[in-house]
Image (cartoon, helix red, strand yellow):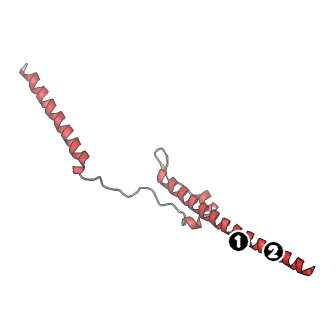
Amino acid sequence: MWHDSYVLVVLVLAALAVVGCVVWVSMGQGGAMAEFPPDVPPLELPDAAQVTAVDLVTVQFPVGLVGYHTGSVDETLQRAATAIRDRDTRIAVLEQKVAELMAGRLQAKSLDSEEAW
């Protein structure tokens, strides 16, 4: 019977040691994990302002264990969104300028026709 009590004491001490180590590491005392460089090749895409439809069609994402590499896909989608946003802004500005020029031309045309009378 004396053997069983020592086993219980050893198990309790081991459990306390494990809990103590977990608490110590969770408080930041265990050091930090090393950062490793990404193991995927960089994407062959130009800057976001110069992305074209051909670039997006021909991009080849690196494949991981369970599918495409998420970081690469996210980066590509972000570049495409930035390029589309910039182009939409440029189109809106150009359409506004065309509307202003057309309004000015129509106003000048109406003034010319009034002077002719």
Residue 89 lies, with reference to residue 30, above or below; the image says below
Determine the residue positioned at 23% across, 41% down: 22
> Circle 2: is it few (<14), some (14-19), or many (20+) Cα within 10 Å?
few
Most extreme residue toward the left is: 2
Say left or right for 65 vs 81.
left
Most foreground residue, 111 or 84: 111
Question: What's the residue type where badge 1 is placed?
Answer: Lys
Most extreme residue toward the bottom is: 115
CB under 8 Å between discs 2 and 1: no
Most extreme residue toward the right is: 117
- Dot 2 or dot 1: first in sequence order is 1
Say left or right for 27 vs 64.
left
- Residue under pointer 1: 97
- Alpha carbon of mark 2 to alpha carbon of mark 1: how far? 15 Å
Question: What's the residue type where badge 2 is placed?
Answer: Gln
* In front: label 2 or label 1: 2
Determine the residue positioned at 66% across, 68% down: 93
For residue 114, which quarter of the picture?
Answer: bottom right
Determine the residue positioned at 59% across, 63% down: 83
Determine the residue positioned at 20% across, 42% down: 21
- Residue 64 spot, x, y in % from top left: 47, 48
- Residue 31 spot, x, y in % from top left: 24, 52
Most extreme residue toward the top is: 1
Helix, strand or loop at label 1? It is helix
Most foreground residue, 31 or 39: 31
For the C terminus, the image quarter is bottom right
- Residue under pointer 2: 107
Most foreground residue, 7 or 116: 116
For residue 3, which quarter of the picture?
Answer: top left
